């Protein structure tokens, strides 16, 4: 039995690439289906897998979460526009053990999907939105071998105290973020990029004016091109 229930799409007659796309907090595969279907239409010869988080969301039992934010931030101060960047990163750093555990489970899931579809690390890509982006980055950097690439959409580097000790891979990285994002606040992006620089992790970063905490077709196009060109 798989680590996570999932939805998957076979695109083309001879899939060569595997993309694992992780949904966000207070979300589900259905909640990001608008973006998944956009991405699906832009890919060629690929398997697109959308795992389902295993836990009911503490914010809304009708939705899902990969891990709890309330355990360290019950008032959701990370979303408060008056919270400093330092305070926001402190919140996500305090969640390091949860991110480490979830990333280990996600790496096991990646292994399962690779075996199921017969696709190697070099042709496997992990992407995520919001909490899913945080998990995607942690998973990719802590994986034994480099994946083909990692894509963060509206994310932040989380769990730095443990992640810095767990980095064993430095895959190609694409970062996409809306400039009007008030959930994973856009003002945190420079600190994420600085951390990546300090870890000698190369990346491409694109931002989008007028985009809030949501994904758009332009981002899906960038993701598809990243997968197909790497």
Image: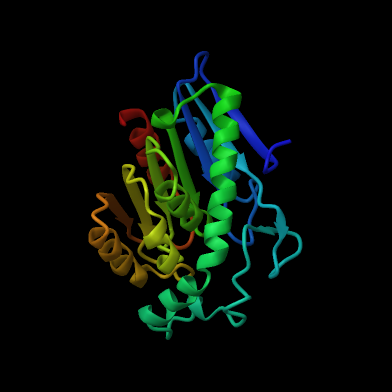
The residue shown at (40%, 46%) is 151
Judge from the rendering whether residue 110 lies leftward or rightward of residue 201; answer left or right. Answer: right
In front of the other: 77 or 209: 77
Residue 211 in view of the camera: no
In front of the other: 2 or 86: 2
The residue shown at (38%, 33%) is 227
Residue 86: quarter of image: bottom left
Q: Is residue 50 above or below residue 193?
A: above
The residue shown at (37%, 35%) is 148
Q: Is residue 148 above or below residue 205?
A: above
| Total marks in image | 0
Residue 187 location in percent, x, y? 34, 72
**Quadrant holding the N terminus:** top right
Residue 6 in view of the camera: yes
Q: Is residue 48 above or below residue 107?
A: above
The residue shown at (35%, 41%) is 222
Q: Is residue 8 above or below residue 85?
A: above
Residue 15 location in percent, x, y? 49, 20
Residue most extreme to the bottom: 82
Residue 25 location in percent, x, y? 60, 61
């Amino acid at each position: 039995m798989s680590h996570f229930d999932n939805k998957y799409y076979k695109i083309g007659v001879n899939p060569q690439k595997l993309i694992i796309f992780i949904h966000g907090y207070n979300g589900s595969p259905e909640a990001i289906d608008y973006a998944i279907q956009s991405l699906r239409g832009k890919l060629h010869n690929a398997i697109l897998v959308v795992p389902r988080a295993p836990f009911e969301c503490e914010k809304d039992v009708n939705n899902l979460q990969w891990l709890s934010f309330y355990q360290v931030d019950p008032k959701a101060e990370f979303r408060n526009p008056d919270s400093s960047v330092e305070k926001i990163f402190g919140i996500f750093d305090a969640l390091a053990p949860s991110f480490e555990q979830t990333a280990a489970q996600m790496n096991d899931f990646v292994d399962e999907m690779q075996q199921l579809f017969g696709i190697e690390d070099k042709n496997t890509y992990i992407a995520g939105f919001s909490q899913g982006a945080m998990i995607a980055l942690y998973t990719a950097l802590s994986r034994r071998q480099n994946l083909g690439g990692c894509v963060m959409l509206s994310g932040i580097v989380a769990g730095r105290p443990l992640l810095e000790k767990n980095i064993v891979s430095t895959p190609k990285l694409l970062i996409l973020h809306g400039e009007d994002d008030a959930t994973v606040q856009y003002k945190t992006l420079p600190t994420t990029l600085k951390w990546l620089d300090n870890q000698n992790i190369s990346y491409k970063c694109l931002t989008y004016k007028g985009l809030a905490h949501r994904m758009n077709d332009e981002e899906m196009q960038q993701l598809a091109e990243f997968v197909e060109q790497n």
